[in-house]
Structures are given as structure tokens and as C-alpha cells.
Amino acid sequence: MAVKMIVKRGNSTQIRSVAKALMVLDVLAANKRDMSLTEIARVMDVPKSTLHGLLATLRDLGYLEQSSFDGRYRLGIRLFEMGNIVANNWDVRKVTAPYIDKLVDELEETVHLVVLDKGEVLYIDKRESQQSLRIVSQVGMRLPAHCTGVGKVLLAYLHPTEVKQIITTKGLPRYTRHTITNPRRLEAELEKIRTVGYAVDNEEIMDGLLCVAAPIRDHNGKVCAALSVAGPVARLEGERFQRAVELVTQTAVEISAGLGYQTALGSGY
């Protein structure tokens, strides 16, 4: 009878073969290209003899595909299918979809739905503006939290110790001359966000880009996501900026109500 090797780390128990199989998927996803057995083995630092069986199993189950020409591996269609299942069953995306469509129609700018994952912002949905000059982004994209409107909103409603841990781990790298790189200044910015109920990224991650973001709460009142509208600074000035703030914050309140946050409507958060 075969015995699986089990690794205990802290309070968790990991099965090595499962962990290695998932690591294969992570390696291919991170490299974003077809890779050979030798390349994957080198990155993972495991013997090719050990890896061969894992690759064959993942291929046979549809999680990997192997080229009939050069034998290289790439992520398989099964992952795409599973990703769609996860996305379709993610309540925040379901509830948010019609609101995002409406917001794009009203503001004619790109709208994003974002969550915080491992100290970074993860874009889980978007609708693009039909303007000739628009923001280039994609679902699945990750960006730093400290210099994005959505990221600052999500940081603002974390416990201070969590924010400090993220800063310690990720740092506060500079992207433009407007990027906040001082922890005390960021702390003051997060306090301001909690007071006014929205965040602004004014050319902090990219020159010429302005973003207005507001928090979305789940049925327990916890901030679970952030909604934003983004566009060129030149288009989001004056009255258009104020309108963006009003519509984004109000839409976030309505989405929160749709997720079961009973006191959202009429409370102004």
C-alpha cells in the first residue's frame, strides 16, 4: 500500500504530493509560458523523476496540456472551467455586475471591482469605458495597495496591526512623485478615508491616472471589496470628479445592501 508523505507546518498539515502538484500550477501561472519538464524541475528544485509523474497526472486530469511537438507543458482547460465556476458562485460579483454596468453608462469611465489578497489588490471584475483614451487593466491583475484608490480603501478598514504587517512585508515603493511612501502619511490618509468614506488615487501609481474608490460591505458589515472608477485626470476634474465621488460611494452603498448589509441604505456608512 502506498503511503503519502505528510508535512506539518505550524497548525497545518500538508500532503507533499498535493503541495507539489499545486506548485506546478503556480510555476506555470507565474511564468505565463509553456515550460519543459527540465525547466519546471529547475524552478521547483525537485528531481525530474519525481516531477514526471505529477505532470502526467495533472495532464491526464485536464489541469495541464502537453504539446505534441516539443513536449512542453501549459495550464489546461480544466483550470479555466473551475475558475468560471468560482467566479459565477462569488456573490459579490453576481450582485455587483448590474451596478457596474450602470456606473459605466453614467460616468463613461472604466469601473473596477477589487478585493484584498495577500496584501495586494486583486481585480476580480471590470467594465471598460468606450472612450478612445481609457485605462488598460484586466481581471486577475494585482497591484500594490498603498498607491491605488481601491487598495487604500481596503487598507483603511483593516486593523492597524494588519496594515503594519502589509507595510512590513510589501514595503511602500514609489511609482510616481505622488506615491505615499511614508507610513505616518499613509496612516493619516487612511484615517481621512474612514472619515469621508472614499479614497482617491491622484496619479499615485501612474502619471495622468485618477481613481475614486469606495468600500463594499458584506452582511456582517465587514469591508469585503472595493469599487472604483478610473480615468485620465483631465477628464475627472471639477464637476465630473464630484459626480464620480457621489456615484461611486452611493453605488457601493447599494451593492452593500444587496449583499445583506441592512443598515447601509440611509446610513451613509
Image: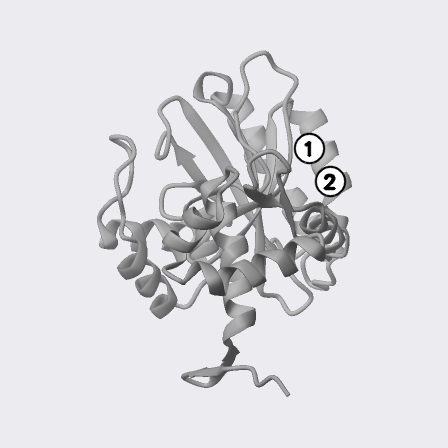
Residue shown at the point (25%, 49%) measured from the top left? 185
Nearer to the camera, 255 or 164: 164
Does residue 192 appear anywhere in the picture? yes
Neighbours of disc 1 within 10 Å: few (<14), some (14-19), many (20+)? many
Residue shown at the point (45%, 48%) measured from the top left? 151
In this figure, what is the number of numbered marks? 2
Nearer to the camera, 223 or 85: 85
User: x and y percent of residue 67 in the render?
Assistant: 62, 38
Residue shown at the point (29%, 37%) measured from the top left? 179
User: x and y percent of residue 234 in the render?
Assistant: 45, 16
Does residue 217 appear anywhere in the picture? no
Tell whether 11 sits left or right of 171: right
Q: Quadrant of the N terminus?
A: bottom right
Q: Quadrant of the C terminus?
A: bottom right
Query: Tag 1, which secondary structure?
Result: helix
Q: Spatial distance from mark 1 to mark 2, Cα to Cα?
A: 6 Å
Q: Are marks 1 and 2 in contact (CB under 8 Å)?
A: yes
The quarter of the picture where residue 112 lies is top right
Residue shown at the point (48%, 49%) measured from the top left? 37
Tell whether 243 sits left or right of 195: right
- The residue tagged 2 is 99
Neighbours of disc 2 within 10 Å: few (<14), some (14-19), many (20+)? some
- The residue tagged 1 is 103
Q: Amino acid at mark 2?
A: Tyr
